[in-house]
Image (tube, helix red, strand yellow):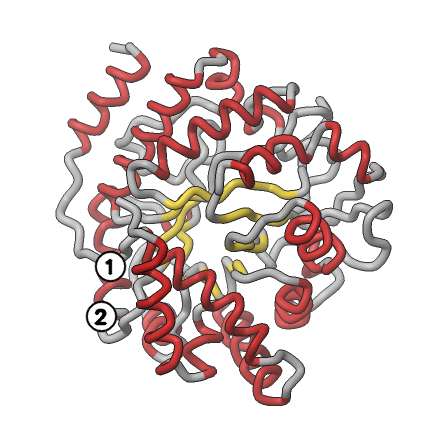
Amino acid sequence: MIEPLEITFSKVDLLMEEMSVEEKVGQLLVVGMKGKTFNHEVDRLIRQYHVGGLILLGKNVSTPTGILDLLNESKKANADNEIPLFLSVDEEGGRVSRLPASMKKLPPAASIGKKNDEEFAYATGAYLAEVLQSLGYNMNFAPVLDVHSNPKNPVIGDRSFSSDPQEVASIGMSVMKGMRDNGIISVVKHFPGHGDTHIDSHKSLPIINKSLQELQQTELIPFQRAIDEQVEMIMVAHIMFPELEEVYPSSLSKKIITGLLRDEMHYDGVIITDDLTMGAIVNDYTVPQAALQSFMAGSDLLLIAGDYQNQVDTLDALIAAVKSGAITEKRLDESVRRILELKYRYKLDDPIQQEIDVENSNQKYKELYKTN
């Protein structure tokens, strides 16, 4: 399923020689959209700006056929571009699910974690990969590797596998491998750890007053395990860690993204931000400001789930920064290379999907969970 690295490197080298600055910058964004059908704004972002990928949220979910049509139209718009799209979704199960109502949804991560069964967790990831591929996706923002260490946490709770970091690591890696071995790119989240917050970062900026040593004893354990298991993508959260960084939240912090994640934890895969339109960011920054700062701090992919104008303004700001020299072409190429290598390793090719067999999918769910 995954292509050998030496073949991928050769393809990417040839492709990058031909890409313009505008095409390279486009690859840095994963964008959201309005509504449940393909529209001219998405068409322009794909054809003119060459964005790297799309994310579908709850507001975009309709019927299985509706999702297929939306993603197929996106692929058709990208047909003249040699670089395939990341087609992503937040499909964790439980209360964070983007499957249509007619399809069986996974239970929350906490229910999977309670079984403490790595084979079952792997089978869950494999099942999830099959369902997502049948809808046309190739990337999933899951599993959650946050440790449920704060019972008052309003945003994580049962989205975490366990309050034990070792259990989160073992079950999380099994789910990740189940998806990866079956062709879905797994994005683990929310680095450096969202489990001990008491504020929802969708609304405002959480603060965690822990030292690096304290984080290493709990929050960072699952992420280090993921890095050791060669996870391809990590999402960075919008959280202040004053003991690590006094000025910027983690998603905009060079000390955390480059210093901690890259240099200390030795991660060399793709780094993506959490959505830059969340309250934790836009209460203090414009989206283009945050995107520029995050990229300069070491992020590769910038997730902008809403507002077309923010997406265009960010693309224009990044292009201007490269052309002015504020972002060097060497720095730009570092991220573009990581992104393209990942796309080609997974042999993404924007295939047009046929209609999903919902009944068959639901039957496989019943077999996995032994329900009637």
Question: In the figure, is residue 196 to the left or right of 130?
Answer: right
Give the amino acid at mark 1.
Answer: Asp
Q: Position of residue 60 (x, y in %)?
A: 37, 51
User: Depth check: 310 or 119 in front?
Assistant: 119
Please report the residue visible at 33 percent of the width from the left and 23 percent of the height from the top: 123
Q: Earlier in the sequence, mark 2 or mark 1?
A: 2
Q: Position of residue 334 (x, y in %)?
A: 53, 68
Question: In the figure, is residue 25 to the left or right of 262?
Answer: left
> Secondary structure under badge 1?
loop
Between the residue at mark 2 and the residue at mark 1, the CA separation in whole angstroms equals 8 Å
Q: Is residue 46 above or below residue 35?
A: below
Determine the image quadrant of residue 343: bottom left
Residue 350 - label: 1
- The quadrant of the rendering that contains the C terminus is top left
Give the amino acid at mark 2.
Answer: Ala
Q: Is residue 334 above or below residue 143?
A: below
Q: Are marks 2 and 1 in contact (CB under 8 Å)?
A: yes
Determine the image quadrant of residue 349: bottom left
Please report the residue visible at 21 percent of the width from the left and 66 percent of the height from the top: 76
Q: Is residue 217 above or below residue 187?
A: above
Please report the residue visible at 43 percent of the width from the left and 22 percent of the height from the top: 107
Residue 176 - label: none
Q: Which residue is mark 2?
A: 79
